[in-house]
Amino acid sequence: MRPKTGFDFTTDGMMQEPSRKPRDTAEVPEQTPANDEGASPAAALAEGTVADRPAAEAPANEVDTLRQENAGLKDRLLRALAEMENLRRRTEREVADAKTYGIANFARDMLGVADNLRRALDHLPAEARESADAALKGLIEGVEVTERDFLSRLTRHGVKKLEPQGERFDPNLHEALFEVPDESVPAGTVAQVIESGYTIGDRVLRPAKVGVAKGGPKG
């Protein structure tokens, strides 16, 4: 039995150094520095706050923008509603005016018919009326009935006859043609009506042509 030594023997009895295994030359992986893992919590919190700040400011800006847009839309809506209300009122007023004053030109032309009927009756002397026979009286009554019916039809359509006799002169309703010396009535009183006036609704269709008293006490 051979003694255990640090040498190996060949078949011929020669000594030989034992074969040495090559050393493991694999590279050792580099170790990651522990600076990040070992950072303090305060520093990490500070870095997180700075990183999250733009993300937090962005929604705030969007909210402000939406509020401004909402305010602008609300203002436009209120203006549109106000314009629609004004349009509705204006349309209603125009429709009402059209109903009331749409026949103004036609009614003004018809005033000549009323004037002629009144002139025919005024030019008949009172004595002739009293001494007239039945046929003439019937004609006179027919003209009077025609005049009353014509005026009633005008009134039905908003046309009214002015009765300024004895009233205070109103330049909006009357047209003064001359002055009449009369101390029994206050100055500025309508003393004589030459041509009747008419109104339609709140407007003057034709002013009354009158004579105004002067010389009396001031009214």
Image: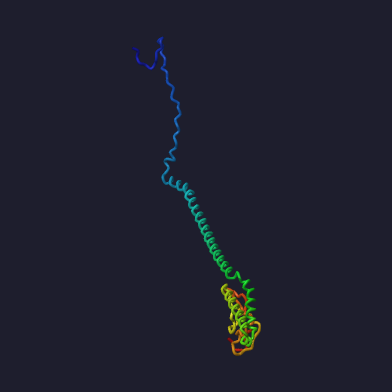
Q: How is the image coloured?
A: rainbow
Q: Can residue 2 be seen in this snapshot?
A: yes
On screen, residue 185 above or below 80 = below
Residue 5: x, y in percent? 37, 16
Residue 115: x, y in percent? 64, 78
Q: Quadrant of the C terminus?
A: bottom right
Q: Quadrant of residue 165?
A: bottom right
On screen, residue 56 above or below 16 = below
Q: Residue 159 versus residue 9: which sits nearer the camera?
A: 159
Q: Residue 121 versus residue 197: which sits nearer the camera?
A: 121
Q: Quadrant of the N terminus?
A: top left
Residue 200: x, y in percent? 59, 74
Task: Work out which residue is located at the far left of the displayed protein and give it.
Answer: 1
Q: Residue 161 versus residue 87: which sits nearer the camera?
A: 161
How many numbered tags mark residues here?
0
On screen, residue 104 above or below 166 = above
Q: Which residue is drawn at the image coordinates 34% and 14% (left, top)?
A: 3
